[in-house]
Amino acid sequence: MMANTGSDTLKSKLTFDDQVIKKIAGITASKVEGIVSLDGNVFSELTNRFTSGEDPTKGIDADIGEKQVKLKLDATIEYGKNATQIFTEVTTKVKQAILEMTGLKVIEFEMHVNDVKTKEELEDKGQD
């Protein structure tokens, strides 16, 4: 007769694809007032012209470890808005969303503002 010694432990591990973390960050950041868009480099801009729809991971780089994340975002903000306030709000909301949805801690966050657009420019873009 064989006795159960309690050594039947389950080994488990939860991991996330980089795209998942980027998507959470992108969707969260895009909901912050003053963020016009998250933008990639010239190549992703060209790609976007030939594809249908927006990519919520565009303009986001993520370095993901087992328990922590480093993020870099490229963003266009609305002209006249306070970039420091936008950055603070994006940082807070993205950190919170990633922690709540994945349990991962954002240990480094960088946002590069690569353009500003006026309300007129935004309205013109909407009429294309």
Image (cartoon, grey):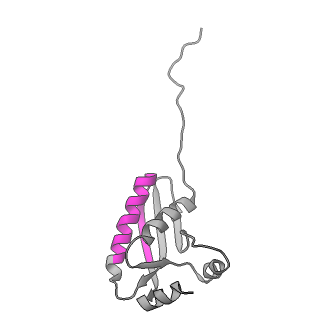
View extreme (top): residue:
1
Magenta stretch, overall SS = helix
Tell me the residue at 57%/57% (across/down). 17
Quarter placement of the N terminus = top right
Residue 64 placement, left or right of 82: right
Residue 75 x/y as whole percent: 47, 79
**Residue in the image at 34% along x and 88% along y:** 80
**Where's residue 13, x and y in %?**
53, 44
* Magenta span contains residue 90: yes
Magenta residues?
86-111
The percent coordinates of residue 12 (x first, y second) are 54, 39
| Image position of 19 with respect to 40: above or below | above
The image quadrant that residue 53 belongs to is bottom right
Camera sees residue 118: no
Name the residue rendered at 47%, 66% in the picture. Answer: 27
Q: In this orientation, which residue lies closer to the viewer: 13 or 23?
A: 23
Residue 43 sits in quarter: bottom right
Question: Is residue 54 in view from this perspective?
Answer: yes
Viewer-proximal residue, 87 or 36? Answer: 36
The x, y position of residue 96, in whole percent, is: 37, 60
Q: Residue at x 34, y 84 (%)?
A: 81
Instruction: State yes or no: residue 37 in magenta.
Output: no
- Which sits in the foreground, 27 or 84? 27
